[in-house]
C-alpha cells in the first residue's frame, strides 16, 4: 500500500488472503482485470511465497509459486489482449528458504505484451532462466522503465 501512496496511485486493498489461497488468488486476478478497464497501470502485490521462505520451507514456497501461476496468472491472462497491455512479473526481494530471510540476490523479471518481442528462450520462470533471458540481470531502478518502455527490453 505504501508504493501506491508514494506514487499517488489509488489504493484498492483487498485485505489478507485467508485460508483459501486459490480463492484469494482468483479474486485478486478478477479485481486486477477489472481495474485494467479503469486505469492504465495496475500493481498487484502477492505476499504468498515470502512467508515459507522465512520459515525455510522450500517445498511450500514452490507450491505457492505454482498456485500463483495457476490461480492468479491463469485467470488474469485468460483472454487478455497482450497486444494492448504489458504485464511485468517480478519479486520485490529474494527470500531463499535456505537463508530464512531477505537477501540481496537478483530476482527474476519477466515482461510480456505490447512492443515486447517474444524471446522464445525458456518455458521457465526463475533466477537462472531470467538471467539468461533477453532482459538479463537489471538494477531494480530499471524495472518500471523497462515495463513502461523507457528502456529497451533487450540487453
Image (cartoon, rainbow, N blue to C red):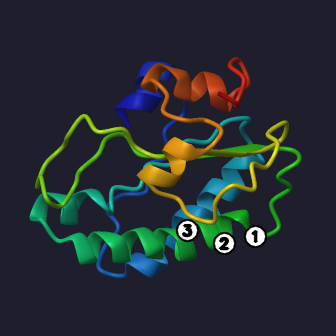
The quarter of the picture where the C terminus appears is top right
Q: Nearer the viewer, residue 132 or 48?
A: 132
User: Which residue was labeled with disc 3?
Assistant: 72
Question: Contact, CB < 8 Å: mark 2 with mark 3?
Answer: yes
Question: Contact, CB < 8 Å: mark 1 with mark 2?
Answer: yes
Residue occupying image coordinates x 72% and y 23%: 152
Residue occupying image coordinates x 45% and y 76%: 67
Instruction: Say what secondary structure mark 3 lies in.
Output: helix
Q: As drawn, is 121 to the left or to the right of 50?
A: right
Question: Which quarter of the figure has residue 15?
Answer: bottom left
Residue 21 percent location from the top left of the image: 38, 76
User: Which residue was labeled with disc 2?
Assistant: 75
Decide which of tag 3 and tag 1 comes sooner along the chain: 3
Q: CA distance from mark 3 to mark 1?
A: 10 Å
Instruction: Say what secondary structure mark 1 lies in.
Output: loop
Q: As drawn, is 142 to the left or to the right of 104?
A: right
Residue 11 percent location from the top left of the image: 49, 38
**What's the mark number on residue 78?**
1
Amino acid at each position: 500500500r505504501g508504493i501506491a501512496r508514494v506514487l499517488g496511485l489509488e489504493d484498492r486493498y483487498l485485505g489478507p488472503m485467508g485460508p483459501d489461497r486459490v480463492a484469494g488468488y482468483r479474486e485478486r486476478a478478477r479485481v486486477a482485470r477489472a481495474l485494467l478497464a479503469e486505469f492504465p497501470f495496475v500493481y498487484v502485490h502477492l505476499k504468498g511465497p515470502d512467508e515459507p521462505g522465512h520459515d525455510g520451507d522450500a517445498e511450500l514456497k514452490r507450491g505457492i509459486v505454482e498456485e500463483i501461476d495457476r490461480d492468479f496468472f491463469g485467470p488474469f491472462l485468460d483472454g487478455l489482449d497482450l497486444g494492448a497491455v504489458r504485464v511485468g512479473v517480478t519479486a520485490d526481494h529474494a527470500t531463499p528458504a535456505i537463508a530464512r530471510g531477505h537477501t540481496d540476490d537478483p530476482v527474476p523479471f519477466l515482461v510480456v505484451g505490447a512492443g515486447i518481442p517474444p524471446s522464445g528462450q525458456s518455458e521457465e520462470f526463475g533466477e537462472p532462466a531470467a538471467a539468461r533471458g533477453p532482459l538479463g540481470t537489471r538494477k531494480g531502478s530499471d524495472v518500471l522503465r523497462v515495463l513502461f518502455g523507457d528502456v529497451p527490453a533487450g540487453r
